[in-house]
Image (cartoon, helix red, strand yellow):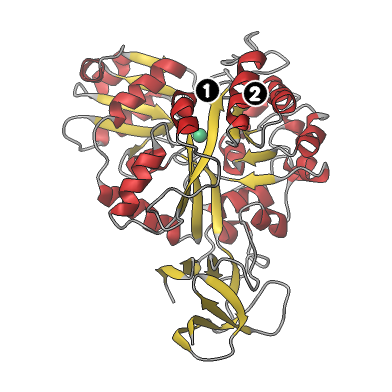
């Protein structure tokens, strides 16, 4: 007897529905007997479960409870949102994008809006806007903090414990969107965090646990080869890549570019080629993959050089602006471009302003695929919501709402976008990580694709979400 049978499942590209049998966590093929449990899918589409290749899960779980300041178009508007908030004590807002604001955020403006401790984090987390009372509480400077100063303030905010209920809630929300796995690049010991979470019964997601250079020695000593399971997590938690942040971000004009920004700067390179190569060599010798944050074209070229010199395997995270000739290097070196398509829509106006004349090679998903490179889609949650359908919709339509597509020449097909958001296949012998859809993504319009309803999610044959 099979553990589970999904009756009348429709597989993409096939007309006749099939009964999918699942046993011991794997798809065994067509049903040959009854199932201990059976679910009638009534012809719904079944695709491999979705992965988000770049998440800061703790941040995401926290952000879901924070004041949303993403709609603010000026200091005054952000302050008005803060003034209208009804929180006691420390108020944390998230999501402002100030690169195109006419005036610069100041501590004084935020003090006037709310004398109590208030911190607003930018949508890309590279900026923290801190008022005087919050600065006292966090032990940092008041005003607009960027890069390392902002990261330090964020770490101080994250020192307060994140309730497991908030984590469970965020996991359930991901499952409801068909997500079966994430690469967690949180600024924390993600192995420790997820071991505890899974030990407490939070078992809705597979997690590849990334880490930063401060933990490299410990991971090497522990034999944390990428893909190896962490004991006691039933195969749900695996050791993930070494993440290295080599440049900044577009909004803060710190993404390292070959050509200057309008103000004359070219951004920052936090880790030079020699240091990066050395780190990547050490990881590679320990069979640890690398996830290299590079946004500007100069930073991407350096990251590719470091992959070449070190022989490392892994990803370049973001890959937002590329020299035309570098797409082929991703393919030749076997480096996956791990891209967050929704950022293209969030940042299109900023990019048009700061990367004038270069946006034809911004978020160049088409160029990458045509060059034979592998692409993996993600959200960088909380920068964009942890919802692969938003990423898929952005990759396919390069717009949202009523605006014209931004560089439609880089649009992916639905097939390509889903392939870049999944691992494995719906086939005998494969792990039963599946998403059952309540609408057809190949037929859905732009808005419907972003909000595509998911009826059922399975992780290893276990139901993690059911709405049918
Ligand atoms: Zn990130």
What residue is drawn where x is 44% and y is 69%?
462
Depth check: give the residue in front, 51 or 91: 51
Relative placement, left or right, of 194 versus 318 is left
Percent coordinates x, y for residue 411 in the rendering = 73, 48
Q: Which residue is mark 2?
A: 353
Residue 161 visible in the current orientation: yes
User: Residue 184: which disc?
Assistant: none
Where disc 2 sits, the SS reads helix
Residue drawn where x is 62% and y is 70% of the image? 429
Ligand 1 within 8 Å of the CB at mark 1: no
**Measuring 37% from the left and 46% from the top, which residue is drawn there?**
194
Element carrying mark 1? loop
The one nearer the camera, 202 or 279, is 279
Q: What residue is drawn where x is 52% and y is 22%?
A: 99
Q: Is residue 346 left or right of residue 257?
A: left
Tell me: residue 318, above or below residue 354: below
Q: Nearer the viewer, residue 357 or 121?
A: 121
Left or right, residue 40 beside residue 165: right
- Residue 45, quarter of picture: bottom right
Q: Are marks 2 and 1 in contact (CB under 8 Å)?
A: yes
Quadrant location of the C terminus in the rendered image:
bottom left
Q: Position of residue 41 (x, y in %)?
A: 53, 81
Q: Is residue 123 visible?
A: no
Q: Position of residue 404 (x, y in %)?
A: 68, 45
In the image shown, does 36 or 419 lie closer to the viewer?
A: 36
**Quarter location, residue 291:** top right
Instruction: Name the residue that disc number 1 marks.
Output: 99
Callout 1 crowding tier (Cα within 10 Å): few <14, some 14–19, many ≥20: many
Q: Give whichever of discs 2 and 1 has the lower sequence position.
A: 1
Q: Seen from this angle, which residue lies furthest top?
A: 264
Residue 27 on image: x %, y %: 58, 73
């Amino acid at each position: 007897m099979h553990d589970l049978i999904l009756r009348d499942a429709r597989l993409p590209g096939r007309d006749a529905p099939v009964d999918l049998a699942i046993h011991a966590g794997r798809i065994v093929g067509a049903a040959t007997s009854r199932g201990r449990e059976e679910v009638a899918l009534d012809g719904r589409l079944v695709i491999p479960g979705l992965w988000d290749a770049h998440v800061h899960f703790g941040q995401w779980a926290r952000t879901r409870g924070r004041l949303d300041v993403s709609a603010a178009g000026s200091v005054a508007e952000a302050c008005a949102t803060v003034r209208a908030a009804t929180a006691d004590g420390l108020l944390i807002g998230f999501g402002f994008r100030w690169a195109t604001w006419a005036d610069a955020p100041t501590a004084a403006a935020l003090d006037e809006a709310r004398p109590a401790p208030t911190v607003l984090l930018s949508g890309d987390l590279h900026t923290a806007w801190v008022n005087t009372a919050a600065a006292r509480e966090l032990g940092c400077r008041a005003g607009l903090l960027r890069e390392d100063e902002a990261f330090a303030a964020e770490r101080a905010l994250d020192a307060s414990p994140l309730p497991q209920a908030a984590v469970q809630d965020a996991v359930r929300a991901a499952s409801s969107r068909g997500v079966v796995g994430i690469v967690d690049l949180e600024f924390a010991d993600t192995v420790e965090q997820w071991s505890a979470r899974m030990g407490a019964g939070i078992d809705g997601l597979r997690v590849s646990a990334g880490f930063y250079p401060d933990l490299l020695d410990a991971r090497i000593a522990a034999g944390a080869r990428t893909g190896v399971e962490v004991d006691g997590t039933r195969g749900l938690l695996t050791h993930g890549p070494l993440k290295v942040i080599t440049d900044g971000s577009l909004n803060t004009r710190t993404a390292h570019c070959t050509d200057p920004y309008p103000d004359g700067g070219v951004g920052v390179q936090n880790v030079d080629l020699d240091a990066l190569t050395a780190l990547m060599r050490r990881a590679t010798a320990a069979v640890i993959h690398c996830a290299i944050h590079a946004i500007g074209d100069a930073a991407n070229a350096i990251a590719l050089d470091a992959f070449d010199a070190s022989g490392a395997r892994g990803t370049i995270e973001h890959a937002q602006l590329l020299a035309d000739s570098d797409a082929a290097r991703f393919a030749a070196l076997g480096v996956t471009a791990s891209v967050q398509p929704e950022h293209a829509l969030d940042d299109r106006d900023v990019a048009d302003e700061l990367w004038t004349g270069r946006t034809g090679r911004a978020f160049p998903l088409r160029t990458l695929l045509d060059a034979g490179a592998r692409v993996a889609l993600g959200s960088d949650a909380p920068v964009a919501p942890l919802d692969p359908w938003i990423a898929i919709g952005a990759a396919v339509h390069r717009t949202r709402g009523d605006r014209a597509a931004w560089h439609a020449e880089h649009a992916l097909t639905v097939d390509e976008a889903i392939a870049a958001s999944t691992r494995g296949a719906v086939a005998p012998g494969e792990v039963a990580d599946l998403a059952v859809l309540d609408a057809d993504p190949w037929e859905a319009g732009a808005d419907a694709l972003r909000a595509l309803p998911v009826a059922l999610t399975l992780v290893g044959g276990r139901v993690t979400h059911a709405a049918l």
